[in-house]
Image (cartoon, rainbow, N blue to C red):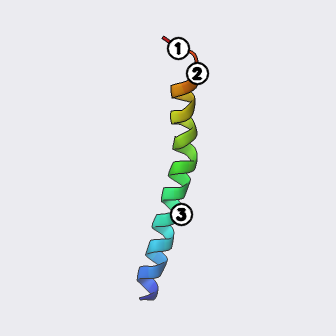
Amino acid sequence: MEKEWVKNQVVFFFYSLFAFLFIPFLYWNNFLPGE
């Protein structure tokens, strides 16, 4: 049980980090002026 909980925390942390970095990237790609 403990190991499973720790694994879930780590997975959640990495997903949060990915979203934090990737969502602004998508946002600027979509909203910056371009062709």
Q: Amino acid at mark 3?
A: Phe
Mark 3 or 1: the one toward you: 1
Q: Where does the image place residue 6, in percent across and percent down from the top left?
A: 48, 78
Label 2 and label 1: CA atoms lie apart by 6 Å
Q: Which residue is mark 2?
A: 32
Q: Residues within 10 Å of mark 2 (few under 14, many from 20)?
A: few
Q: Amino acid at mark 2?
A: Leu
Count of marks overlaid on the render: 3
Disc 2 secondary structure class: loop
Residue at figure coordinates x 45%, y 65% from the top left: 11
Q: Which residue is mark 3?
A: 13
Q: Residues within 10 Å of mark 1 (few under 14, many from 20)?
A: few
Disc 1 secondary structure class: loop
29 lies above or below 17: above
Q: Residues within 10 Å of mark 3 (few under 14, many from 20)?
A: few
Image quarter of the N terminus: bottom left
9 lies above or below 35: below
* Mark before the other along the chain sequence, 3 or 1: 3
Label 3 and label 2: CA atoms lie apart by 29 Å
Disc 3 secondary structure class: helix
Q: Contact, CB < 8 Å: mark 2 with mark 1?
A: yes
Q: Which residue is mark 1?
A: 34
Q: Is residue 35 left or right of residue 28?
A: left
Q: Amino acid at mark 1?
A: Gly
* Mark before the other along the chain sequence, 3 or 2: 3
Q: Contact, CB < 8 Å: mark 3 with mark 2?
A: no
Residue at figure coordinates x 52%, y 49% from the top left: 19
Q: Where does the image place residue 2, in percent across and percent down from the top left?
A: 46, 87
Q: Where does the image place residue 27, in percent across and percent down from the top left?
A: 55, 34
Residue at figure coordinates x 56%, y 45% from the top left: 21
